């Protein structure tokens, strides 16, 4: 490949659009010359830049090169300690900064940094500019750029990139024809990273294209910039595209007709058709956007497919700071979703022991002042990336993980955490972030939910949602060795590099510290907050802060929230419904709500007897006819017994009504098995407390009362369901509650919830444990048709609540069922 000198196109057109101002190529050349005349540096010196993105940042880079100096870009979010490390390692003779960051820089200087001459961009506005033309004074092997790897572990290292390295990458990109001088590229990423400076600064200016700079990378700002300036190429990282994707898909999902067209477009998988269907979306984005360019980290293939279905193909690439940075990327006309494309012209890639190695003119000169690290990374001319990957028969590269991030389980299986994280994120739109780690030899996942999305979906019991609709959904789709054995819900953002890569060595601190930030406020000292925080501290055992989330930070589950509602009513003389509480899950929001309507502040004792109320308090209209359910019992007796060789025992232990039946939950057959097994005299007065999700269709809602079913929604009316159950028990009726709250995933028992124990103790009725065995094998989760497998059901000796607390009742009932299961249920 022939390498030309570093240049900026010498044409009279707009080079940069920034804050509504259009800056021409002649202006850019002139200001570079003015900056170059200002800085007292020569060939081989170094110039640092510590600033947010702005046109002057670009001028400073080329000004340093015009003097023959290398540029040391510093992250605008760096701390004084970070700056001291970079300065003392690279020894710049001058630094450019901005008024906003000048104080941070001076703090670094007072801590030992030696920056040489300091130039503040705002102070240079009065410079006399006489025109000129940029010309690099660097030779091909001179250091041009020394970025410091932000790194996911360890101390940042200076990466020495020569002018030849950068030019080879620029010309490799241009030779593919992916961009031209007619393009307008959206620039939103911080320039101190090699990926954005290469793709949204050096290459566009070399070509003569236009850079559209956006200060705040919000979805609205991005859409406005695309529409206003007719952006043709949008360069970003997965983190940005995920936000952009959520914004667009949120609107698509709200419109049933639009969503139907989206699903059609996705199934057809033809770009021309997708662009026709979603032409209005493209018009809203300016009508010129040809494709999105993603790099810096792995983009979820599902997001890439969905963007393509919207008529916005994603060109995904791969590279590292050490490779200037691009190694490979997909071309718009030959995209393979899931891959990072083919290597650039002149770049060689091989896979050695699963690791990706690269050779070519884009590979760095080495790490600054670290010869040993350089020798470890570059061997026989090949740079070993530390990434794991594979090449397909067409030469497309696939990234399978980071060598140092791979999790090796106790069973010897190697796990790529990024792969699992992508699958978890694809499971539910209500998850913002997921991070997988190893804990006690098993996979463990940190989940950061999208609270606004959960609120919009009326989901208030976050842990239950994450457990069953995210983790369980994922687990059911993978082999055993990839299953997540535990999770934790956190409210703080994960520690990441500026390009969105998780700093995995810091994840351990997220478990212990993310939930309880030291920056949280302890709240006001008025009597409302004092009473509320005292109660929350009492039930959670934790200090209470205004920013705390009732569930994620203070650990209140669905039953704990019901007790909280009772506390509010008794203490403040006001009523808050479960539905209202679902929108008041932050302590500060609940405090403000109570403060506005509190009648009094008088702390009262809260007990479940008060929560359940007295007979007649709840308006309950129950269907007392028994013809339908007894007819169903007759049908089930004729079919279940021969098909499943269904065996029932222990019915003689059933006490006088009322009582609570507490069966383990193996399959969707269980409710029908209880109906078939209960003696007719007991079935007539028995009612099933069941989750509402199985009774949402009009037909099922109509049938439910006749089958003695009382549906409830865990997020909206659990308290009402418990009160209805209490009324039924007081009226001499029996109820059936599945203590696990969900079906088993492996045939074993899930943790038991204490709702049945509360009812037993407070109403004074016995609990009859029921052991069901065989139903899981006959009709496991995910099956469509039950198969003929022998099922046993046994009624176990009743547990009377006298003198026991809730946990003791739960423990005895669970152990009783476990013991029967171990013995084979039917003796």
Image: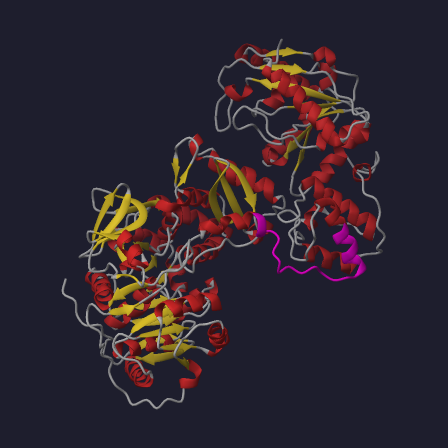
User: Do we see residue 430 in this rendering?
Assistant: no
- Residue lying at the far left of the rendered structure: 2
Q: Is residue 536 above or below residue 206?
A: above
The colour mode here is secondary structure
Q: Is residue 323 above or below residue 449?
A: below
Q: Which residues are magenta?
A: 512-534
Q: Is residue 48 magenta?
A: no
Q: Is residue 522 magenta?
A: yes
Closest to the observer, 585 or 94: 94
Q: Is residue 659 above or below residue 543?
A: above
Quadrant assignment for the N terminus: bottom left
Point 73% across, 13% down: residue: 653
Point 23% across, 60% down: residue: 362
- On the image, the x and y values in percent for residue 743 come to 57, 28
Quadrant assignment for the C terminus: top right
- On the image, the x and y values in percent for residue 153 come to 42, 53
């Amino acid at each position: 490949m022939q390498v030309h000198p570093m240049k900026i196109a010498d044409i009279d057109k707009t080079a940069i659009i920034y804050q509504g101002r259009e800056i021409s190529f002649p202006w850019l050349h002139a200001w570079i010359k003015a900056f170059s005349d200002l800085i007292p540096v020569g060939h081989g010196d170094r110039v640092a830049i510590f600033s947010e993105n702005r046109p002057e940042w670009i001028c400073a880079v080329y000004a340093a090169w015009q003097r023959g100096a290398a540029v040391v870009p510093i992250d605008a979010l760096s701390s004084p300690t970070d700056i001291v490390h970079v300065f003392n390692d690279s020894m710049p003779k001058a630094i450019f900064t901005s008024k906003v960051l000048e104080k941070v820089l001076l703090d670094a200087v007072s801590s030992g940094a030696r920056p040489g001459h300091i130039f503040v961009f705002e102070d240079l506005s009065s410079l006399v500019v006489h025109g000129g033309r940029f010309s690099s004074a660097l030779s091909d092997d001179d250091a041009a750029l020394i970025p410091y790897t932000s790194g996911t572990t360890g101390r940042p290292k200076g990466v020495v990139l020569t002018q030849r390295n950068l030019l080879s990458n620029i010309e490799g990109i241009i030779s593919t024809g992916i961009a031209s001088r007619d393009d307008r590229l959206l620039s939103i990423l911080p320039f101190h990273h090699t990926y954005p400076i290469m793709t949204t600064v050096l290459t566009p200016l070399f070509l003569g294209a236009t850079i559209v700079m956006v200060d705040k990378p919000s979805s609205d700002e991005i859409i406005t910039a695309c529409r206003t300036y007719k952006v043709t190429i949008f360069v970003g990282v997965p983190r940005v595209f995920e936000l952009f994707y959520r914004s667009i898909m949120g609107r698509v999902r709200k419109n049933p007709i639009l969503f139907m067209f989206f699903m059609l477009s996705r199934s057809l998988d033809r770009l021309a058709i997708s662009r026709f269907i979603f032409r209005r979306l493209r018009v809203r984005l300016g009508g010129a956007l040809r494709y999105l360019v993603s790099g810096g980290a792995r983009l979820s293939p599902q997001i890439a497919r969905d963007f393509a279905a919207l008529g916005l193909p994603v060109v995904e690439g791969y590279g590292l700071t050490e490779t200037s940075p691009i190694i490979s990327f997909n071309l718009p006309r030959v995209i393979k979703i899931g891959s990072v494309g083919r290597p650039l012209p002149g770049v060689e890639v091989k896979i050695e022991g699963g690791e990706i190695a690269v050779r070519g003119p884009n590979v760095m000169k080495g790490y600054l002042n670290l010869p040993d690290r350089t020798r470890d990374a570059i061997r026989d001319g090949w740079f070993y990336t530390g990434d794991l990957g594979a090449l397909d028969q067409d030469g497309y590269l696939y990234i399978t993980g980071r060598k140092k991030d791979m999790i090796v389980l106790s069973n010897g299986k190697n796990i790529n955490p990024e792969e699992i994280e992508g699958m978890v994120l694809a499971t539910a739109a209500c998850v913002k972030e997921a991070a997988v780690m190893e804990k006690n030899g098993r996979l463990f996942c940190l989940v950061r939910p999208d609270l606004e999305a959960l609120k919009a979906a009326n989901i208030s019991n976050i842990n239950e949602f994450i457990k069953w609709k995210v983790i369980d959904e994922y687990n059911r789709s993978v082999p055993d060795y990839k299953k997540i054995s535990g999770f934790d819900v956190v409210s703080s953002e994960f520690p990441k590099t500026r390009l969105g890569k998780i700093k995995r060595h810091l994840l351990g601190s997220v478990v212990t510290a993310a939930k309880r930030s030291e920056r949280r406020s302890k709240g006001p000292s008025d009597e409302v907050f004092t009473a509320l925080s005292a109660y929350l501290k009492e039930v959670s055992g934790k200090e209470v802060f205004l920013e705390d989330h009732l569930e994620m930070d203070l650990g209140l589950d669905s039953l704990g929230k019901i007790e909280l509602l009772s506390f509010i009513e008794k203490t403040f003389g006001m009523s808050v419904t479960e539905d209202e509480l679902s929108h008041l899950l932050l302590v500060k929001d609940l405090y403000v709500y109570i403060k506005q309507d509190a009648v009094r502040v008088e702390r009262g004792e809260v007990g479940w007897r008060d929560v359940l109320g007295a007979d007649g308090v709840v308006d309950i209209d129950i269907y007392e006819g028994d013809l339908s359910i007894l007819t169903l019992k007759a049908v089930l007796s004729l079919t279940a017994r021969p098909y499943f060789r269904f065996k029932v025992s222990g019915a003689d232990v059933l006490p006088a009504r009322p009582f609570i039946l507490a069966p383990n939950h193996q399959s969707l057959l269980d409710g029908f098995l209880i109906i078939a097994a209960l003696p007719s005299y007991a079935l007539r007065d028995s009612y099933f407390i069941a989750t509402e999700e199985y009774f949402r269709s009009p037909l099922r809602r109509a049938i439910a009362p006749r089958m003695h079913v009382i549906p409830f929604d865990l997020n909206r009316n659990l308290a009402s369901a418990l009160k209805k159950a209490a009324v039924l028990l007081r009226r001499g009726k029996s109820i059936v509650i599945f203590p696990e709250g969900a079906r088993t995933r492996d045939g074993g028992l899930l943790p038991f919830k204490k709702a049945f124990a509360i009812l037993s103790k407070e109403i004074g009725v016995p609990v009859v444990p029921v052991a069901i065995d065989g139903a899981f094998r006959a009709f496991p989760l995910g099956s469509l048709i039950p198969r003929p497998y022998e099922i046993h059901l046994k009624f176990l000796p009743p547990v009377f609540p006298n003198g026991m607390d809730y946990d003791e009742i739960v423990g005895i009932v669970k152990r009783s069922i476990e013991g029967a299961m171990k013995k084979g249920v039917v003796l």
